């Protein structure tokens, strides 16, 4: 990474990390998410330069981010065909609408709650 930043004829720094370049790196990535460090390395620039462009793309609704650790942030391209906010879930998804089915095949085990609790308590006393 070079610290010799180029300037145009007005003395302004020339943009070396473009939003298009960042998006191209993200599209070529084998993973659906990237970090600013990965983008910066792929472009031969700093992770901070990449992060600044990612923030700009986020402001435009093109990418989204999520903090996944103490200092780790992952970025992804927003699906333009998807309706609604990125973090919104679809309430009609079968995960939320289908009745709960237990491994026994039953959908309502509330009648067996006392037996399940008794078994659990018995299991705790066996461990002592």
Image (cartoon, grey):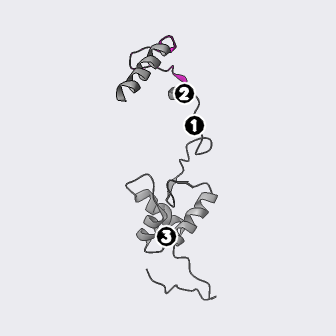
- Disc 1: which residue: 89
Residue 92 drawn in magenta = no
Instruction: Give the Cα distance between marks 2 and 3.
Output: 39 Å
Q: Is residue 106 magenta?
A: yes
For image coordinates 55% across by 76% down, the residue present is 15
Q: Position of residue 110 (x, y in %)?
A: 51, 14
Q: Provide residue 127's location: percent of width, then percent of height.
A: 35, 29
The one nearer the camera, 55 or 108, is: 108
The magenta region covers: 96-112
Distance from disc 2 to disc 1, alpha carbons, whole Å, reads 10 Å
- Report if the CB atoms under discs 2 and 1 are less than 8 Å apart: yes
State the residue lying farthest toward the front.
128
Under circle 1, the secondary element is: loop
Q: Is residue 7 above or below residue 97?
A: below
Which of the two discs, 2 and 3, labels the residue nearer the N terminus?
Answer: 3
Q: What is the quadrant of residue 85 in the picture? A: top right
Q: CB atoms at circles 3 and 1 under 8 Å apart?
A: no
First reached walking from the N terminus: tag 3 or tag 1: 3
- Residue that carries the numbered disc 2 in the rendered image: 96
10 to the left or right of 99 = right
The residues tagged by marks 3 and 1 sit, at their Cα atoms, a distance apart of 31 Å
The residue that mark 3 highlights is 47
């Amino acid at each position: 990474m070079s610290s010799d930043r180029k300037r145009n004829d007005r003395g302004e720094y020339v943009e070396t990390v473009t939003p298009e370049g960042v998006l191209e790196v993200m599209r070529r990535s084998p993973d659906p998410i990237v970090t600013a460090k990965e983008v910066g390395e792929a472009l031969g620039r700093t992770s901070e330069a990449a992060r600044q462009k990612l923030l700009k793309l986020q402001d435009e609704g093109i990418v989204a981010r999520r903090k996944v650790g103490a200092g780790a942030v992952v970025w992804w391209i927003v699906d333009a065909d998807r309706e609604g906010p990125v973090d919104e879930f679809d309430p009609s998804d079968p995960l939320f609408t289908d009745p709960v089915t237990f491994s026994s095949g039953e959908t309502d085990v509330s009648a067996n709650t006392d037996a399940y609790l008794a078994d659990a308590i018995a299991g705790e006393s066996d461990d002592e």
